[in-house]
Amino acid sequence: MAKTDGDITKERILQVAEELFAEKGFDGTGVDKIAKSAGINKGSIYYHFKDKNHIIESLFEKIMDEIAEHINSASNAGEVDHNKLSLEDKIRSEIRYMDQKKKIISVLFMETLKSGNPTDSLIRCMEIIVKKELNSTLKIDKLENLSEDEFQKYMIHEFFTGIIPVISLITLKDKWCKYFNYDEDKLLEHFMEAFINTHIKSHADL
Amino acid sequence: MAKTDGDITKERILQVAEELFAEKGFDGTGVDKIAKSAGINKGSIYYHFKDKNHIIESLFEKIMDEIAEHINSASNAGEVDHNKLSLEDKIRSEIRYMDQKKKIISVLFMETLKSGNPTDSLIRCMEIIVKKELNSTLKIDKLENLSEDEFQKYMIHEFFTGIIPVISLITLKDKWCKYFNYDEDKLLEHFMEAFINTHIKSHADL
Amino acid sequence: MAKTDGDITKERILQVAEELFAEKGFDGTGVDKIAKSAGINKGSIYYHFKDKNHIIESLFEKIMDEIAEHINSASNAGEVDHNKLSLEDKIRSEIRYMDQKKKIISVLFMETLKSGNPTDSLIRCMEIIVKKELNSTLKIDKLENLSEDEFQKYMIHEFFTGIIPVISLITLKDKWCKYFNYDEDKLLEHFMEAFINTHIKSHADL
Amino acid sequence: MAKTDGDITKERILQVAEELFAEKGFDGTGVDKIAKSAGINKGSIYYHFKDKNHIIESLFEKIMDEIAEHINSASNAGEVDHNKLSLEDKIRSEIRYMDQKKKIISVLFMETLKSGNPTDSLIRCMEIIVKKELNSTLKIDKLENLSEDEFQKYMIHEFFTGIIPVISLITLKDKWCKYFNYDEDKLLEHFMEAFINTHIKSHADL
DNA sequence: CATGAATGAGCATTCATTCAT
DNA sequence: GATGAATGAATGCTCATTCAT
């Protein structure tokens, strides 16, 4: 299970690609640049990935696995630790977690916005989160017991008023702060207040 | 003031470019393709636009002007007509308006998500809307009377829990419906409910 | 015989083209740029000149006519005025004259250096000068009396050790002075000395 | 130290480029044509050279290195061999050497003639030769002992009445012979005579 | 005469991809 | 596993030229 040289190279490619895709977009990033930034030979990339698309697909799979794992570990590790946290702290903690993933989330977002692209990974990825969230929010044993409409109702609520504001915050905060010349911490505070007064408050009504 | 041949060509380029950028992204769209889709010669594009960037910039300027004008005309035309509408209807009407602009908004969104891009047009564009909204929401004569922090507080609230959910709805709804095989009208209904229960409700507290 | 608007435009085109060709070379200069620099419409150029080549050809004809005229007027106007000048002053005066034409001479030179170009205008142009010079140097009534070899002998002597050093001085002096950070007047003095000690001195032997 | 495939390709590019640049000039030669003439793919050129300018720069560096080496080897190999040659033979030998380099010298000349071009390679290149020549002509131990003006005096003399006639002969002789329908060998003889009667004779006075 | 607009071929350059070593 | 080298299609852009008005 030890990491081979190849594994290390592969990981470096993914790491660098994530960075560059977030900076310039998938189409705006050349394989050449990935290779150069990773300090490896361009041909090497094609040893590890069948083509450029395979790189972004791997990135998408990786983030989806990580999020799934994060969600499970959170609820497991939790019970004791996690439940002691206030709701606000939980949200802050989630935002902090998301912030670590902001690069790949930006990429996910950009690609999903392209209408001519079958990519729906942002939705697929966020579905994992929302389903989990729904699971803990609702006192229902099984999600499957919900009618499609009820499922969509919650899904849409969580996605558009919960997830989307958070990932927008994360992916846009740098530009926001630069544009308004505003402090990031203050932005986060105001966001928290707004988020609690909208999305979180609405949870009480469910 | 009559439209010259050149103006018509220029408009067709812009029109086609908007469509294609929304489909494949800015970097994913070749100037060749724009020309072919517009039924004109590639060189012609460079007669009207100094380079490819100039096309997207023109598109951004155009949407910003249109939105500014839309906002003004809405509040002016209003008083009688507009005020008769229920709040819900007003929101629906705004969503319908935004829906017409969804292509360029997608492009705006994608480009703003690229961290290595100075583009902040999405923010700049939405700032116009939020400022106007703030103006009518608050009973304050002048926005300038607000402290920077208070201004940011409202701005952040409106942007991340008001505007962002709406433009996400608009730009992602096609993929959402396809992914979940769900009806667009129903999606809209659920969104409306969620939006009212979160963002709109929070307005009462201001 | 009055200059029409068209004539003025044509002259401006030629003037600007000369400037730009000397700066960037014929191939390095776009018709677009000529038009822009001349402050006229690109199509206009094609009213006055059938194609880009026609511009440079006109330029070449013009300089050849001017030089022919200069040579005749010099020897005519002369006799009194001109003959009063010392040999050195005559050379200085010729160099000053050439200096006014340095742009077109540069172009002539560049184009003649291209082996794949039928252009031999530099040679043709300089032939005029050398023939004239020979005429006044030699006490022979008719150049035609010379055998081909004798003609070539003088021609080659005048061209390569007389004309060429002078036009090289003229076309390269700016770069020389910049490269060595040397004063132009001093360069001219040193050149004069060298020129007199080589080419001019050799005239005594003829 | 063995030549790799890449080195061979690179050399072929340089070789072909030199030929074509001399024929049509730098701006008149497309990268496409270089590739086709070299029998390689266009993209390959950009693997070996960062851009078109890099090709000409490499060519300039190469000739400068070669000339520097030629000059050193000439004076070293010499003493015995070389000094046995008559002055005339030495000149002929130098002309023959220059003739081998006439293509790149033409290019050097053309580019240096463009006023809008920082290129001063012709001067820089010839400086090497003149300095060396000065070293052997003058009985002075160190060039550095000369005042700037004295240095310039000799430099200008050698350059404009020595080097320039020679490289003009070399770069223009084909056109001269074609224009006058004259024999190349005879041209060379006449040039030699003229050159000896001007530049070489002047050396006696130094 | 001059202009705005267009055209298609050509330009330098970059792309994703392949493959022998 | 990794590298250097190559390939051909496509990129963004400029070119000389044309022509209706």
Image (tube, coloured by chain):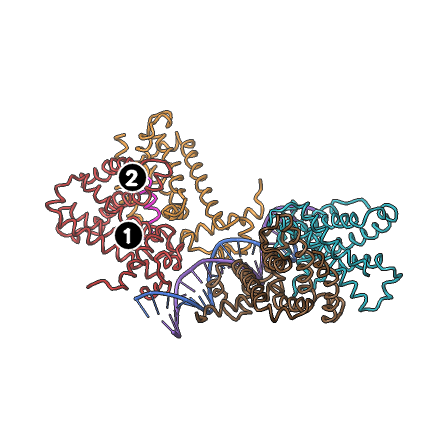
Chain colours: A red, B orange, C cyan, D brown, E purple, F blue
User: Could you say whether the residue bearing mark 1 is in a helix, strand or loop?
Assistant: helix
Question: Residue under mark 1: which chain is it in?
Answer: A
Residue extent of the magenta highlight? B162-178
| Residue B186 percent across, percent down from the top left | 28, 48
Is residue B175 on the magenta stretch? yes
User: Could you tell me which chain the residue with mark 2 belongs to?
Assistant: B
Above or below, D6 against C162 in this view is: below
Q: Main secondary structure of the magenta part?
A: helix
Please report the residue visible at 58 percent of the width from the left and 40 percent of the height from the top: B1
Q: Is E1 displayed left or right of B84 in the figure?
A: right
State the residue position of label 2: B161
Residue D27 visible to the viewer: no
Mark 2 residue type = Thr
Horizontal arrangement in the rendering, residue C70 relative to residue A49 (left or right): right
Look at the image and tell me whether residue D119 can be seen: yes
> Is A136 in front, or is A10?
A10
Q: Nearer the viewer, residue B34 or D59?
A: D59
Q: Is residue A11 above or below residue D116?
A: below
Q: CA distance from mark 1 to mark 2?
A: 19 Å
Location of mark 1 (residue): A123
Q: Where is the C terminus of chain C found, in terms of image quarters?
A: bottom right
Residue D101 location, x and y as percent?
61, 66
Q: Amino acid at mark 1?
A: Ile
Task: Check the image and report above or below for D125 versus B159.
Answer: below
Q: Residue D96: which quarter of the image? A: bottom right
Q: Quadrant of residue B100?
A: top left
Q: Is residue F17 left or right of residue B16?
A: right
Query: Is there CB contact under 8 Å for labels 1 and 2?
Result: no
Q: Is residue A193 magenta?
A: no
